[in-house]
Image: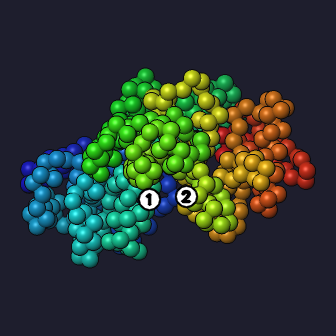
């Protein structure tokens, strides 16, 4: 066991020595570390959670356990590990646990460590840590820091550009970088090596479906699971119901379909957006729109006959809204009017509708502009909201109509 921990310490030190881009978060790292509650850094695989944790703890005396290490899991013994930690990391102040959900009974063990006064930073790639296991064992004892792939703003910074001052840059250069991000996404490993994007993300997608879903949940019918995952990816941004999915794909049952959809959400691969309604029962019955955590997965895996730039932009906006703290349970929805006109995103703060957001890749056609603005205004009237935003790929202006002002912005201006 001591050799395993020494090897992990060497791995930790090698990672600490590398240069990194400091990611954007809504939290102050010093305030987080000073707080005795557990710090949970969650999000999809390979988006930089470990990097974020290491940057938080750089310069501190901290111990490190990586549970993606099969040797650690096979040799696991709680008392032995704690004794060896004291030997390998004398007088450590913080304990970093990476992918701890791979350890059976991890939640009870973490709860015990917390009661003993350990200052814990936990990394996990599974949303169930929050929705079930973490909430049950550690209610009120943890702070969540969610990590997602690079934002467009971070990609600009990675390319040594100031995203808040693009006035000195040629519009063609800004457009090229923005279009590249739209199509290929923001996974850190691919941002600097676009030639590997398709193969890397195709392999990662398959690994998430197999390792984080199929193996974790002991799914027997892996063919149906993979069929559903590919169908959701191909139909991103479209409204779907479990009944329709079960029928269209010939899956064994609606219950199994719903279960598989939940499984595919757990590793932050897919998200489901509810249709806004004041009546919870009606909201639960309506079709939910499907989004994927990164546009690069669509480019790498989905079977599409066209570029689908409009849907790619809508998906990008959705993920950016998640990044800014909106969530699909309380504050982020889509909406359809009584006349079946749709607005892409309803942002809610408490009981108040904060903003309506429409997404349209190209507004150059007067017919397209009328359709999008009419839908936005009709939904605004029904929801009593005058804060209206229309996000497009290539123009910024204001549209005044029927007493409403619609702010039109390019994605990079958000």
Select label 2 or label 1 by which is in front: 2
**290, 297: nearer the viewer:** 290
Name which of mark 2 and mark 1 comes first in the sequence.
1
Is residue 177 rendered to the left or right of residue 215? right
Local SS, label 1: strand
Q: Looking at the image, which is closer to me, 101 or 178?
A: 101
Callout count: 2
Q: Is mark 2 on a helix, strand or loop?
A: loop
Q: Residues within 10 Å of mark 1 (few under 14, many from 20)?
A: some
What percent of the width, then of the height, locates residue 170? 68, 26
Which residue bears the numbered disc 1?
145
Residue at 69%, 53% in the rendered image? 335
Q: Give residue 15's position: percent from left, percent from top.
A: 28, 44
Q: Where is residue 47 in the image (x, y as percent from the top left)?
A: 41, 44
Q: Which residue is at 45% across, 50% downward?
A: 254
The reply, left or right, for residue 207 in relation to residue 297 is left
Color theme of the render: rainbow
Query: For mark 2, what is the residue?
Result: 327
Question: Does residue 22 show up?
Answer: no
What residue is shown at x 75% (from left), y 48% (from top)? 340
């Amino acid at each position: 066991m001591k050799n395993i921990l020494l090897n992990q310490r060497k791995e930790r030190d090698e990672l600490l020595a590398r240069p990194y881009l400091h990611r954007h978060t809504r939290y102050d790292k010093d305030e987080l570390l000073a707080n005795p509650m557990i710090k949970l850094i969650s999000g999809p695989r390979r988006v930089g959670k470990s990097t974020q944790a290491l940057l938080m703890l750089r310069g501190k005396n901290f111990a490190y356990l990586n549970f993606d290490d099969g040797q650690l899991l096979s040799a696991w013994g709680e008392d032995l590990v704690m004794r060896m930690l004291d030997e390998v990391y004398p007088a450590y102040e913080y304990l970093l646990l990476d992918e701890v959900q791979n350890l059976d009974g991890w939640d009870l063990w973490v709860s015990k460590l917390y009661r003993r006064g350990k200052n814990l930073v936990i990394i996990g790639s599974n949303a169930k840590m929050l929705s079930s296991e973490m909430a049950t064992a550690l209610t009120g004892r943890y702070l969540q820091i969610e990590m997602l792939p690079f934002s467009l703003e971070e990609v600009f910074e990675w390319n040594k550009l100031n995203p808040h001052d693009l006035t000195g840059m040629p519009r063609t250069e800004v457009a090229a970088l923005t279009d590249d991000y739209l199509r290929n996404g923001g996974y850190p490993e691919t941002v600097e090596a676009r030639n590997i994007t398709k193969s890397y993300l195709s392999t990662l997608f398959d690994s998430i479906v197999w390792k984080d879903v199929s193996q974790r949940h002991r799914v027997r019918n892996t063919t149906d699971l993979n069929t559903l995952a590919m169908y959701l990816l191909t139909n991103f941004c479209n409204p779907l119901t479990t009944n329709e999915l079960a029928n269209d794909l010939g899956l064994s049952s609606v219950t199994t379909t719903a279960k598989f959809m939940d499984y595919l959400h757990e590793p932050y691969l897919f998200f489901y957006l509810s249709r806004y309604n004041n009546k919870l029962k009606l909201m639960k019955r309506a079709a939910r729109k499907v989004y994927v955590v990164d546009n690069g997965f669509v480019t790498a895996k989905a079977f599409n006959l066209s570029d689908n730039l409009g849907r790619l932009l809508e998906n990008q906006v959705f993920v950016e809204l998640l990044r800014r703290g909106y969530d699909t349970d309380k504050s982020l929805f889509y909406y359809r009017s009584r006349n079946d006109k749709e607005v892409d995103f309803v942002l809610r703060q408490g009981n108040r509708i904060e903003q309506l957001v429409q997404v349209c890749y190209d507004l150059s056609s007067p017919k397209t502009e009328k359709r999008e603005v009419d839908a936005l205004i009709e939904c605004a009237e029904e929801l009593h909201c005058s804060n209206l935003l229309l996000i497009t790929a290539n123009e910024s202006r204001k549209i005044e109509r029927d007493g409403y002002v619609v702010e039109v912005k390019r994605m990079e201006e958000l």
